[in-house]
Image (cartoon, coloured by chain):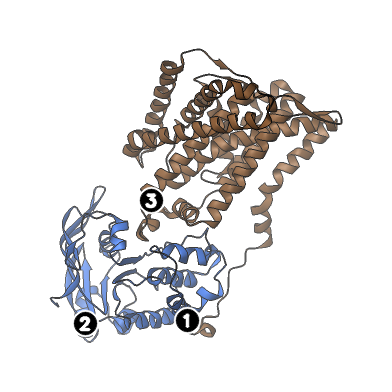
Chain colours: A blue, B brown
Amino acid sequence: MMADALLSLSGVHTHIGPYHILQGVDLKVPEGGVTVLLGRNGAGKTTTLRTIMGLWTASKGDIRFDDHVITRLATPEISRRGIALVPEDMGIFTDLTVAENMILAAASGPMDAKRLSWIKELFPPIGTFWNSSAGTLSGGQKQMLSVARAIIEPRRLILIDEPTKGLAPAIIKAMTDALRELKETDTTILLVEQNFAMASSIGDTVAVMDDGRIIHSGSMKELAGNAALQEKLMGLSLEAHQ
Amino acid sequence: MSEAAIKPRIEKIPLKEQIFQKLPVFLVPMLALAGLIAIGNPSSWLTLTVAGLAMGMMIFIMASGLTVVFGLMDVINFGHGAFVAVGAFVGFTVLAWLAGWTASPSVMLNLAAVLIAILAAMLITGLLGLAFERVIVMPVYGEHLKQILVTMGGLIVAQQMIYVVWGPDELHISRPQALQGSFVIGEAAIEKYRLVAVAIGLVLFVAMRHILKKTKIGLLVRAGVENGEMVEALGYRIRRLFLIVFMTGSALAGLGGVMWGLYQETITAHMGSEIMVLVFIVVIIGGLGSVEGCFIGAMLVGLLANYTAFLAPKVALISTIALMVVILMWRPQGLYPVVKAK
């Protein structure tokens, strides 16, 4: 992998209660572009994102972001360094309106009007339902709000956990287009995704996890073009998931 | 992204569900109406209703901090009554110092004395809340059983400290001149102090709603109640926020203590633990973590306690427990359950 990694994990172990989930994760996320983290259910993908974000603390190993060790930093401090999380459950505050969700996401001050209008173009329902309760949004709209919150302030790295899970094909396409546009803004994205067709269409680099370890890393182009490798790593073929 | 392709739409809440959600708001007027029918005499009803609302407001003031503390950090604070008692003792001490003002015929001096007593009580209980959170609550986050045990322990320590500072006897104090006596409307006698209690409670409720709905710190509290982890992921230190809420809740309990003390005109070191039974009933009825639910629950408890004390004094002893049982059978999570993502 590339040497100028924005984020790197070296030998990261994470325990949750009695369970040893991450068992020595080594991962490098190059600056710019999209790195996709693949793997079957229970492989440790979500735990990896949560450990990077400080929501679970690594019991061993180092996490470096922009050449600084962030392994033991508290979550708010990690966020302030420019890392945002779009969690698997979206983390929407359903008791608040869409506007209030966005106001909170702009942690460093008032929202930048230009950036907000770009986000509203990227995700039209954000503008349409600006004053509506976020709890009344559909699943796809909540996912858009979750991503919109993560990008309301310029971030260096966005961790996105399965943004297409449970969404209709039209929404998946829209979300993919939005992530592609986001990628053009020099924002680095670490994407956990089960939908291989979507992941391979926007991913630049890829890492595959199994049993709490990275078992493969390389370019997405290489993996997408090698059905035998996909079969070996994940027991799937790209064709079967298109 | 094309809006047309996605066809934005919002999930409509069915009318039946909307009515079900709004129903608790009508419980207070419904209970007041039922009280009027049962009591028959409008003058007695008016006196009892104002007394009930005043009692409810004072319980709300004491309970509001407790419910937000639980909602935000899942902390069950059985020591909350300590702030009520300490607030009352501090307030009474200040009023005793200002005896010249409270005995004066000047309404302004009377009210100034009460205001200073309230501010002193809130300041001391707020600081006590800071120490309580750092020393007692912080080490047991996430462990409910330990929270119950150590906060109960904190309550006992606080009661013993009151014995040390103020002695073991109960204290008596008369309300300032301006807050004594009643207004007579027709045949109904309405105590002035109860009207003041209703006014302070209403102002506090409106202010709390405004802060929770319109300010960023209020948004953070509401968001933190629902999903504290996500609030942290957005870059906010929820522990610091919780400390502010805990201190504010403690200060409000101190305010409630002064008001309850002036209402009873007698205070004891155990008054906090005694009133906590009603406070917990209100918090449970309202839905743990809900300020609106807490307010409605407090009004219901206040009105019902006064109506039943008039109509059937023996039933009054169990009326609030019975109310809680009925509400929980109807809504097992309380009137306005707080949605938690944790």
Q: Can you identify the residue that label 1 sits on?
A: A121
Of B273 and A165, the residue lying toward us: B273
Looking at the rendered structure, the kind of residue marked 1 is Glu
Q: Can you identify the residue that label 2 sits on?
A: A223
> To which chain does the residue with label 1 belong?
A
Tags 1 and 3 both on a single chain: no
Q: Can you identify the residue that label 3 sits on?
A: B238
Looking at the rendered structure, the kind of residue marked 2 is Leu
Q: Residue shown at 81%/35% (left/top)?
A: B36
| SS at mark 2 in the image | helix
Q: Residue shown at 67%/34% (left/top)?
A: B196
Of A68 and A146, the residue lying toward us: A68
Q: Residue B268, percent across and down?
A: 53, 19
Q: Earlier in the sequence, mark 1 or mark 2?
A: 1
Q: Residue shown at 53%/21% (left/top)?
A: B97
Q: Residue A147, percent across and down?
A: 40, 71
Looking at the rendered structure, the kind of residue marked 3 is Ile
| SS at mark 3 in the image | helix
Q: CA distance from mark 1 to mark 3?
A: 32 Å
Q: CA distance from mark 1 to mark 2?
A: 33 Å
Of B320 and B174, the residue lying toward us: B174
Q: How many marks?
A: 3
| SS at mark 1 in the image | helix
Q: Residue shown at 47%/72% (left/top)?
A: A140
Q: Residue B248, percent across and down?
A: 47, 41
- Check the image and report above or below for B72 versus B188: below
Q: How dense is the environment of label 3, judged by Cα within 10 Å: few (below 14), some, or many (20 and up)?
A: many
Q: Are marks 1 and 3 in contact (CB under 8 Å)?
A: no
